[in-house]
Image (cartoon, rainbow, N blue to C red):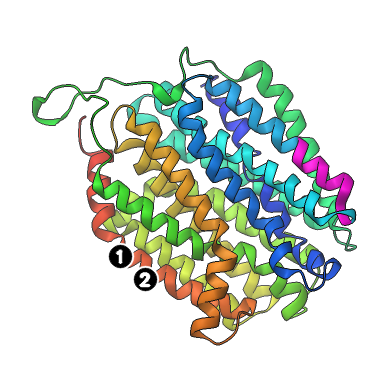
Amino acid sequence: MKKLIPIYLTNFVTLFYMLTTVPLGYMYQDFPGKHHVVILMATLPTLTCMFTALLSGSLSRKFSSRTLVLAGIACSVLGGLMVRVINRDSLMVCIIGVGLTGVATGFIQTMNYATLAVIVPEGKREKAVGWNDAVGYLGMTAVTVLAGWLAKDGDWARAYNCYFMSAVVLVIAYFTYPETGQAAGVVVRKEKETLGQSQSTVTDKIPFCVAALLLIKFFSAMFNMSGAYYISDLVINETELGSSVLVGNSAMVYSLANVIGSLIVYLFFRLFRSGSYAISHLLAGISLCMIAFFPAKGTILVFEALLGIGVASSHSAVSTMATMAPKGRNVAIATSLFVVAAYFGEFLCSYGTSFAAAAIVGNSLPSSALKVAGIMCVILGIFSIPFVKRSRELAFFTNR
């Protein structure tokens, strides 16, 4: 248990890049006519996260998980403080800074999932992954609320003071993060297969059902993250319901619900079985539509909470199956692909959803984008059922 605490602590800062979504409406005001450039402040971290996740597999052959995690947090601190110091003086430097914050997410999540797969007994692994995700969402809760209050007068750069917390985590992790004895990404665990078959080898392939779920995860991230990326513009600009304080409060509710969703994912598996992922997406889709059709302070807070449960439970479900269903070295490969799918889909969220809204509804207003995103979440959830069924069998009921 002591080894897990520093792992969870580093995961606390993985979603700090989400603080940009809170004062995003003010950024649009400070840089008029540059909407498609400003949005990179919120989306670029997901792209750099994807690239670092892809690199982590090969880098883990040369560097330990601890080294990569520490390097990721250091880049995050540097990038966040770059934005804080430069702010309105150079939009391009700020974009580079937020890009660096995504390095932490890519390295930390990939290495933490792989490390948990090594040091946690298989029977307890799904709970360990759930707690790991929950701590990440708890960090997002803290940082989005704090960002909302720091930027409430329109000075969005103050929100990046939150990265001083990352600096503290970096120091603690330097002294406490565990060494696994070998890079977690290349550990081959000897596990027995079903029906007395021989032990697993590194030549086993990632199961097709898991690969299909990773593809679905890519598209679902493109749509179910709309609640995070469009809420600031909806509240501050389209409906003028309030300031970044309301956005920060809604983000807090969403993040706390994320914590709950990631912790109850195992219950979702037991209650809804093969339909667990579909139920999560149905909940997310309905919530997005309700926020879009009935924008009001109360509606936003209530359905941001339900949206958070749906998004987090579906996210943790896929991360659990990606960690537990594959064998041997493919665990690290699957977790890297999971991070890539999740964050590349999230990077395309504001572009893909806006494009879909313009094509289907005729405009790309935040409310229109949320409506389209809600419908797509439901469709993707239904499509996932057969793949969840097989992945669930491999993860929970196969003695490998």
Q: Is residue 87 magenta?
A: yes
Q: Are marks 2 and 1 in contact (CB under 8 Å)?
A: yes
Q: Residue at left 24%, top 52%? A: 389
Q: In the image, is residue 358 above or below residue 193?
A: below
Q: In the image, is residue 264 above or below residue 249?
A: above
Residue 329 shows in this picture? yes
Q: Position of residue 322 (x, y in %)?
A: 36, 41
Please give left or right for residue 47 compared with residue 81 in the image: left
According to the picture, the residue beneath numbered tag 1 turns out to be 383
Viewer-proximal residue, 323 or 137?
323
Determine whether the residue tagged by mark 2 lies in a helix, strand or loop: helix
Amino acid at dot 2: Ile
Determine whether the residue tagged by mark 1 lies in a helix, strand or loop: helix
Q: Is residue 153 magenta?
A: no
Residue 241 shows in this picture? no
Please give left or right for residue 90 compared with residue 206 in the image: right
Q: Residue at left 59%, top 75%? A: 291
Q: Quadrant of the C terminus?
A: top left
Q: Position of residue 343 (x, y in %)?
A: 53, 51
Residue 279 - label = none
Over which residues does the magenta segment extend? 78-88
According to the picture, the residue beneath numbered tag 2 turns out to be 379
